[in-house]
């Protein structure tokens, strides 16, 4: 009987179920202490998800189900390994990694963000990456400073 009429996949096809690695940023992997803990937790979750696939009897299905957790394990292991924990800023005189900065835009909006590592950034939750355009503009600036961004002016109101 031809392989075309069977349900089983060849072992070569099963071995090809590898997802491409998640891209890793070329920037330094700076993180807060909380960011490192979050990366370690995500690594643990990925490992547990991968381990759970070992109970799947069908080798092809096991490889399919393990592909995502295996890729995530590689990513989070690399991010934990290269993490550079940056302590909270000692001063609130100027914006630095880990600072929470409040600024006003020339259209009247007032926004507050904490500047954190790339993996822990979540603008909807009030944090932005230190490599984001806004964070790069604000870094090193003090209360009262005005910086320009894409036709907008940002005035720093508070740093904590």
Image: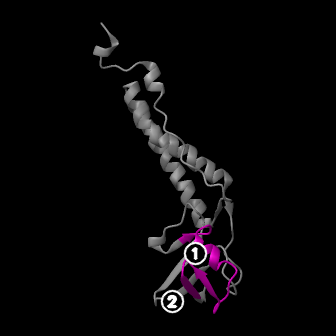
Counting residues from the start of the chain, the first of labels 1 and 2 encountered is: 2
Magenta region:
128-155
User: What residue would you read off at disc 1?
Assistant: 134
- The kind of secondary structure element at disc 2 is loop
Report if residue 7 lies within the magenta region: no
Measured in 3D between alpha carbons, the distance from the residue under mark 1 to the one under mark 2, in whole angstroms, is 14 Å
Report if residue 130 lies within the magenta region: yes
Q: Which mark is residue 9?
A: none
Q: Quadrant of the C terminus?
A: bottom right
In the image, residue 106 above or below residue 135: below
User: What residue would you read off at disc 2?
Assistant: 106
Q: Position of residue 140 (x, y in %)?
A: 70, 80
Marks 1 and 2: which is nearer the front?
2
Q: Is residue 87 left or right of residue 154?
A: right
State the count of labels.
2
In the image, residue 45 above or below residue 18: below
**Residue drawn at x 57%, y 60% as measured from the top left:** 37
Residue most extreme to the top: 1
- The kind of secondary structure element at disc 1 is helix
Q: Position of residue 137 (x, y in %)?
A: 63, 77
């Amino acid at each position: 009987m031809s392989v075309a009429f069977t349900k089983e996949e060849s072992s070569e096809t099963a071995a090809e179920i590898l997802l491409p690695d998640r891209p890793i940023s070329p920037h330094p992997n700076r993180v807060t202490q909380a960011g490192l803990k979050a990366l370690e937790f995500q690594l643990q979750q990925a490992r547990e998800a991968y381990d759970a696939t070992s109970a799947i009897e069908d080798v092809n299905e096991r490889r399919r189900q393990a592909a995502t957790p295996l890729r995530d394990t590689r990513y989070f292991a690399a991010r934990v390994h290269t993490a550079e924990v940056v302590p909270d800023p000692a001063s609130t005189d100027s914006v630095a990694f880990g600072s929470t900065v409040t600024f006003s835009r020339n259209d009247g909006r007032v926004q507050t963000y904490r500047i954190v590592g790339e993996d822990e950034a979540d603008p909807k939750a009030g944090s932005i990456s230190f490599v984001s355009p806004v964070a790069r503009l604000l870094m090193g600036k003090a209360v009262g400073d005005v910086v320009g961004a894409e036709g907008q002016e940002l005035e720093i109101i508070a740093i904590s």
